[in-house]
Image (cartoon, grey):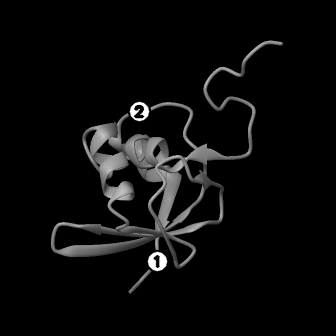
Amino acid sequence: MAALDDDQGLDWQRLDKWLWCARFLRQRAECARLVADGLVRVNRQPTDKPHAKLRPGDVLTIPLGDRVRVVRVVALAERRGPAVEAALLYEEIAA
């Protein structure tokens, strides 16, 4: 049986990988650590699992520095591209 390459062809993506591709932090390990510390919420539910399944339409609450960003996932990432491309993966929700 052949293994799936990464998350290709699925309707979900790992939370830490999506955060990294969307350029919220510089390193994927930092993204995983932020989630593992229980600081990120998915649809208002706290999670400490970097491998949590993220789908389009999910709402994330992400503390970054002295700000808390609330974003809606618009698309899953195919790769970690430039900032302009990463900004298309989510939309900000007004506080």
Q: Is residue 36 above or below residue 1?
A: below
Give the answer, above or below, for where 93 lies relative to 65.
below
Q: Are marks 2 and 1 in contact (CB under 8 Å)?
A: no
Whole-percent x, y for residue 65 in the image: 17, 67
23 sits left or right of 13 in the view:
left
Q: Where is the C terminus found, in terms of image quarters?
A: bottom left
Instruction: Name which residue type carries label 1.
Output: Ile
Tell me, for residue 74, which label it has, or none: none
Where, by quadrant of the figure, is residue 94 drawn?
bottom left
Residue 25 at x, y percent in the picture: 27, 48
Which residue is depicted at the point 34% across and 43% down?
A: 83
Seen in the image, is 94 located left or right of residue 64? right
The 10 Å Cα crowd at callout 1, few under 14, some 14 to 19, many 20 or more, is few
Question: SS at mark 1?
Answer: loop
Residue 71, percent across and down?
46, 69
Q: What residue is pinned by disc 2?
A: 81
| 28 up-or-down from 36: above or below | above
Q: In the image, residue 51 lies at what x, y percent?
A: 53, 46
Under mark 2, the amino acid is: Gly
Residue that badge 1 annotates: 93
Residue 19 vertical placement versus 44 (above, below): above
